[in-house]
Structure formats: structure tokens, C-alpha cells
Amino acid sequence: MGGPGTLAVLDANVLIHYRFFPEIDWCTELGVPQVTLVILPAVVHELDERKWSKSEQPAKKARSVLSRLREIDDGGRIREGTSLSMPLHLCQVDPAAHGLNPGSGDDRILAQTLALRASQPEHAVVLVTADTGLSLKATSRGIHVRELREDLLQPVEPDRVRQRIARLEQEVAELQKRQPVLVLEFTSTRGEKDARCIPAVQLPGDPDLDQAVAEERARLAYPPTTATGVWVHSLATLRPPENEVKRYERELQAYLDRYREWLQNRAAYEYAAARSLQICLRLSNDGGAPAEDVDVFLGVPSHVDVGDEAFPGQAPEQPSPPVLPSFGAGLAPLLAALQRPQPWFGAPLGPWRCLEVPGAQPNVTGPSVEQKEEWQVRYHVVNVKHHMSVDLEPFWIRFPEEVRAAPLQLSYSLYPNNAPQPFKGKLLLDVREGVSDA
């Protein structure tokens, strides 16, 4: 290493991560007319360690650098103004003598650089490294440090493991594009929330029932009257047989007992119907492939009643009044007309309704309702085309009399046969108790 010029000590990271050193114009990079590149024994040792790295890419680069170093003659000129030196005599330098840690690879390189500077005082010594820690230590000991430009870095080539991961990630993304993406939503709102209000309905008390029965008795009293309470003149002079009158009075009393019971049952029916909600749901597929053989499981809290038919079922049938005493066939139609039932307490409320929806597709079965820890409503859908939806048959939820209406959270799980995992979500039925007009 005799003669004038600058000694440039190359760190291992420069040899591995930057272009191979003979390809770099070192005189231009360092701004000197002549430079000797120095590969220290500690750097060769670090390259030997890195070639056994578990990470494929660093190991591959370290082996490549060592192989090419063997092809270059020590002391030979590698390009105009640039030569190479690999001084083996610096192996015996003790890092501890310079206050450094012998177990640290960076400290061994720094110790040998200090020894090189001491043995070649006529040369300027420069440490070329991209290691921040090594740069700080070298600067603190008076060693000049240089870092190469970023455009001299080798392009990063992913190792086989990273390439495989990237390829698998791409395949997964492609598969996801070709899979169904299912969501359950309310038909009326086309979303995960539906607001409902249960109207307040008061059951009639005994005074109301007594009044209704009294009005029915007056309407059916014999002899028949008009709506204003005036006897029908054409019938006032007629008198049916006594046994017919007694028969009618007996049957009238039995009818009024049944009528009172019917009033109670009808009021209970209308009350239950008013506290019932029809739940209409839609299964949508937002993915890139049809969903096949989809099992739909919907969980409903157990404090309400759930059914696959409307609550509370069939309305109670109104009893028929007794036949008036017989006057002969000619008067029967007139008397029957006077006995037509009159409305009571206004028109029935009827079952609670939601927005009417088209009928479910033929490939939908359900709902089937089962009570476990919570209510479970189940459907099965044979096929849902991508970017299409299927309306499910409605089911009903009823709030018992002792349970105040409040918001309900419904959880669902969707299991398509051609998807790797289920789709899960929640629906909010925002139910509020209505206010009575009274």
C-alpha cells in the first residue's frame, strides 16, 4: 500500500448493498486523483458470517461478494486511479487496546481502521459505510467517514420467501375477487337498522264490556225497534206464539254471554297484534361470484316471542245472534235485516304490518324457528347471484304484555358453501313504545 493517495476502507454493508466496488468511480466519488480500496480482515469475517444467514437475500449477496473478491488480485489495479488492498497483518489488532468491544463486529472494523491509519500516516484514511452506529464511533475517534450516493444502491431483489409471499397474497386477492360477499339487511330500509313504533292499545275494562253488552241487548230486544228506538208500527200489532218469545229470550241471554267473551278475546287479539312486528329481510351478494347453498342463522333475544306465522294467529269468530220469534216466512228477511251486527269500538286494528315486499324466490326455504338460549331463525338459500339479492320470507316478533318495547339487536351468521369463512354481522331493530291517545 505504498505510494501517495487515499485509503478508503469499505464496510461490509457497502460491499453487499451497493454496486460491486469495481463498477464505482471512486476517484470521482471521493474527489481524489488516486485511491486504494481496503478490505479489512474484519470485513471479510463479517461477510463469511453473513453468507450463512437464514435470510436468503443477504446470504446470497455475501457469497457473491466473497466469490468475486477471490477473482481480484490483491494490490492490482481495478480501474484508472483505483487499486485494491486486503491487508491480512491487521488480523492481530486487539480492539480492547483502542477501548472497543472485541465481541462487536463494528468495533473490530473500527479497531483495524485505527491500526491502518497508525501504520500508514502518509495516507488519508476514509471509512466508507452506511452504518450510522459505526459512523458515529469513527467520527468520535477522528476518522473521516463517507457515505455513497443512494443512486449507487443495488435494486432490492426480493428473496424466494418474499416472492412466494407476494405471489400468494396476489392469489388470495384474486380468489377474494371471485368469492361471494354476503350481507343481511332490512328490506324496508336497505340497511342494518329499522325503526318501528308499537302503538299503545288499552284493553277494555268491565264497565266498557258491560256497556257494549247492554247496547247489544237493546239492539236485539223484542219487539224489534228502529235505530231511533221507535217500535216498528207494522210489527207492533203482531204477537208471535209465547213459546217462541221465551225461546228467543233464553237464546238471547246465552248469546250475550258468548258475545261478552268474544269482546274480551277480540280485544286481547288486537292487543297482541298491535305488539307484533313483521320482520322482512333481504340477503345481498356484493361479491364477484354467486353464493351457493347458503345457511342463514339469525339470533333473536329470548325475552320476546318469535314465530314463523303472524301473531296471534286467527282472529276470534264473532258469535251469531239468536233467530227472532217466528212470524212466518214473509217477515223473516225484514227481521233479519234489523239484526245486522253493528260496529263496536271502531274498526279492528288488525295485524301490525311492514312494507309489502315481493314474494321470496323459489330457492329460499324457511323460516324455521327454534328456541335455545336465544331464539334462532334459520333459512336456506340455494343460490344468490353476484351483485343480486334475495328477499326472505318474513317472520314475526312479539313483545309480551309484561315486556316493554325497546330496541333489539339481532346477530346473524351466513354460511355459503363456496366461501372459506362465514359472514357475520348485526342488525338493529329500533323499537319504541307508542303513546296512547287517551
Image (cartoon, rainbow, N blue to C red):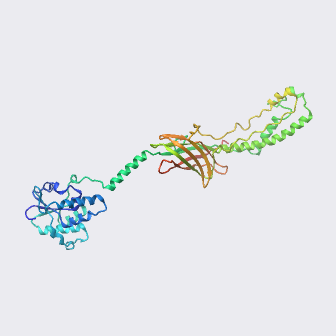
Q: Is residue 422 left or right of residue 153?
A: right
Residue 199: % across, % down? 64, 43
Q: Position of residue 315 (x, y in %)?
A: 71, 41
Please tell me in which quadrant of the rendered image residue 198 appears.
Answer: top right
Between residues 21 and 255, which one lies in front from this camera angle?
21
In front: 235, or 106?
A: 106
Dividing the picture into quadrants, the one containing residue 177 is: top left
- Above or below, 375 relative to 38: above
The image quadrant of residue 77 is bottom left
Q: Position of residue 369 (x, y in %)?
A: 62, 48
Q: Report if residue 130 is visible in the image.
A: no
Quarter holding the N terminus?
bottom left
Q: Residue at x 92, y 32 (%)?
A: 241
Give the total number of marks visible in the rendering.
0
The residue at 16%/60% (across/down) is 71
Q: Is residue 300 above or below residue 133?
A: above
Q: Residue furthest right?
A: 242
